[in-house]
Image (cartoon, grey):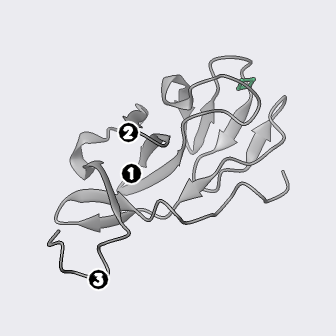
């Protein structure tokens, strides 16, 4: 990403798109936020890594289809939307729109989507 590209200034590159495998979430740590990256067929999805119910790391969770099961209390989320799908989770995860640039998965870290939706 050239630094002179005004559209690229707000984007954050998380990882190479082909580094994300189906059914195996990828943890991406940054100084301000940890992200969990998921693949479902050809599509990539980005959520906050931290479960909204407690200290569970969703990148360590069990993936089945479009759901991830938190390893801490076994609550579940749809990682495409961030919405909780099984208790005790009742608050949506923050999610980001994936943007592919030259094979890199990027997001706008300031985007707010998902976490205020009702479960
Ligand atoms: S910490 Fe994730 S379900 Fe409780």
Q: Position of residue 40 (x, y in %)?
A: 44, 49
Tell me which corner region of the image, top left, top right, bottom left or bottom right, holds residue 104.
bottom left
Query: Marks 2 and 1, how far apart in space?
Result: 7 Å
Q: What label does residue 94 carry, if any? A: none
Rate crowding at label 2 as few (under 14), some (14 to 19) or many (20 or more) other CA atoms within 10 Å: some
Left or right, residue 102 beside residue 54: left
Q: Position of residue 54 (x, y in %)?
A: 73, 25
Foreground of the two, 19 or 108: 108
First in residue order: circle 2 vs circle 1: 2
Rendering quarter of residue 51: top right
Bin the neighbour count of mark 3 within 10 Å (Cα to Cα): few under 14, some 14-19, many 20 and up: few
Q: Any mark on residue 6, and which?
A: 3
Please tell me in which quadrant of the rendered image residue 9 appears: bottom left
Report the Cα–Cα distance between label 2 and label 3: 33 Å
- Asked whether disc 2 touches disc 1, contact meaning CB atoms under 8 Å apart, the reply is yes
Q: Secondary structure at mark 2?
A: loop
Mark before the other along the chain sequence, 2 or 3:
3
Disc number lying in front (2 or 3): 3
Secondary structure found at label 1: loop
21 or 5, nearer to the observer: 5
Residue at x 74%, y 18% (from the top left corner): 73
Tell which circle, 3 or 1, labels the residue nearer the N-terminal end.
Answer: 3
Q: Residue at x 31, y 41 (%)?
A: 20
Which residue is rendered at x = 64% and y = 56% of the image?
81
Instruction: Select label 3 or label 1 by which is in front.
Output: 3
**Is residue 20 placed above or below 117 in the rendered structure?**
above
Q: Say whether mark 2 is within 8 Å of ligand 1.
A: no
Depth order, front residue of 39/26 = 26
Residue 98's place in the image compared with 67, above or below, is: below
Instruction: Give the residue number, with chain letter if any, for mark 1.
Output: 41
Q: Which residue is mark 2?
A: 22
Residue 66 position within the rendered picture, expressed as x and y whole percent measured from the top left = 57, 45
């Amino acid at each position: 990403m050239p630094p002179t590209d005004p559209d690229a200034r707000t984007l954050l590159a998380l990882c190479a798109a082909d580094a994300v495998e189906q059914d195996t979430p990828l943890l991406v740590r940054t100084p301000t936020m940890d992200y969990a990256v998921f693949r479902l067929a050809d599509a990539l999805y980005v959520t906050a890594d931290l479960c909204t119910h407690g200290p569970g790391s969703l990148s360590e969770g069990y993936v089945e289809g479009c759901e991830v099961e938190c390893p801490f209390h076994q609550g579940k989320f749809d990682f495409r939307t961030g919405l909780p799908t099984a208790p005790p989770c009742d608050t949506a995860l923050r999610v980001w729109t994936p943007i592919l640039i030259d094979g890199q998965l990027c997001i706008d870290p300031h985007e707010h989507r998902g976490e205020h939706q009702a479960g």
